Image (cartoon, rainbow, N blue to C red):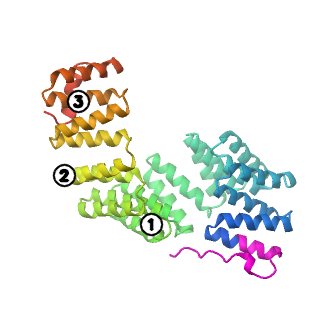
Amino acid sequence: MPKPRKPTPLRSRSRPDHADLWERYARSCRHAGDFQNALVAYDRLLVLTPDRPDAILDRGFILERLQRTSDALASYDRLLQHQPDNIDAWIAKGMALRSPEPTSARACFDRAIAIEERSAAAWYGKGLVALDAQQDNTALDAFNRSTHLDPDFAPSWLERGRLLLRLERYDDATIAFDNALQIQPDNADAWIERGRALAAMKRHDVAITSYDKAIDLSRDRDRVTTASAEFARGAALAAVNRSDDAIAAYDLGLDHDITQLDGHRDRCLLLERFERFDAALLGYDRALTLWPEHLDLWFARGALLCKLRRHEEALANYDRIVQLQATSSEGWLQRCAVLERLNRPQEARQSFAIAEQIDPSLKYGDRRKAFSSLNLG
C-alpha cells in the first residue's frame, strides 16, 4: 500500500485564514505523517479559534510525535484548565507521562476512571502503567476490564494477548489476538504476535501463514515491522527444518532494517545450527561493523572461531574482548583456555590470574569448563 501523499501547502489555496481550511489541512498532514506542518496548521487554527478542545488535544498528540513531550503536556494542561473533566485530555496526559513519570500517569488514568468508570481507554492506560511496573495481575485485570467495557477496543485485546503470551498462556493469547484482528484485520503487529503464540504451541505452519499476512500488510509501509515479521517467519521456518527458506527470511528482514541486532544475531546462530560456519562468521563480522563494542557478538564470534579450530584468530578475538572490558572475568577465562590450546601455558596462567582477581570465586578447574565449552578438547 503506497504511503499517503504529502498535502499541498495551504498557502497556495484560497482564504488561508479560514479555520475550516486549516483544520482540514492539519488532519491531512497528520494522516500523511507530516507532523511538522500539522503543528503549524494547528497553531494557526488555534489562533483563529482558541477554544477548540479537539484541536488542542490533537496538537498535543502532534507534539508527542515530534518528541516534544513537555510541550504536549502543556497543551493537555491548557485544555484541562478550561475543561477539568475532559476525559480524553486526562487519558492523553497519562499516556504522555507513562515513561517519564509513571506515578503521575497512573493518577491521570485514575482521574479519568473517576470521571467515567466505563472508559475502556482509561482502563487500557491503567493496564499499561501496571505492565511497565511488572504488575502482571493488575495489568491483566485492567485489560480484562477494558475489553469487557468495550469489546471493540482493539488495543486492549492486543496488549492482553502480549501479556498472556509472556505468561505462557498461549491458547488465551491466541484468542486475544484473534479478537484484536476481528476488529483491526490490517494490524500487522497483531498478526506477528498471533504467529508467535502459535509458534510457541509448535503450530509452525499456521504461524508462518500469520507472519506472511503481517508482511503483506506492512511491506512498503513500515520497514521495521516488516523486518520483525521476516525474522519471526525465519525462526518458524527453521523450526520445521526449512533451512534455506529460514535464512532467506532473515536476509529479507535485514534488507528491510539492518539495524535490528537480534536479527543479525539470530541469523548467525541459525547459520551455525545448519553448520554454515563460514557464513555465520561473516555474519558476525557484518554485525560488528555496526556494533563494534558489543561483547555478546565478540563472545559468539570467539566461540565459533574455536569451533573452526582457528585458534590464533580466536585469541585475537578474546584480546579484543578484554580490551573492551578489562573487568570481564569470562573474557580472561576463555582467553586462558585458548592460550592453553595454543600451548602457551605461562600466558594462560597470567590470564587466569587476572580472571581470578576479578572473580575470586573462580577455581582452577573452571579453566577446563571453558576449554570444554569452546570445543578446545
How far apart in space, not on screen, are marks 2 and 3 (Cα)?
A: 22 Å
Disc number placed over residue 370 in the picture, else none: 3
Q: Earlier in the sequence, mark 1 or mark 2?
A: 1
Q: Nearer the viewer, residue 220 or 332?
A: 332
Q: Callout 3: 10 Å neighbours few (<14), some, many (20+)?
A: some
The residue carrying mark 2 is 275
Disc number placed over residue 259 in the picture, else none: none
Residue 364: x %, y % from top left: 22, 19
Amino acid found under the numbered disc labelled 1: Ala
Q: Nearer the viewer, residue 24 or 119?
A: 24
Q: Which span is picked out in magenta?
A: 1-26
In the displayed structure, 317 sits above or below 195; it is above
Relative horizontal placement of residue 82, taking residue 371 as reference (left or right): right
How far apart in space, not on screen, are marks 1 and 3 (Cα)?
A: 42 Å
Question: Which residue sits at x=50%, y=69%?
Answer: 221
Q: Earlier in the sequence, mark 2 or mark 3?
A: 2
Amino acid found under the numbered disc labelled 2: Glu
Disc number placed over residue 214 in the picture, else none: 1
Relative horizontal placement of residue 247, taking residue 39 as reference (left or right): left
How far apart in space, not on screen, are marks 1 and 2 (Cα)?
A: 30 Å
Whether label 1 touches label 2, CB < 8 Å: no
| Residue 294 seen in this snapshot | yes
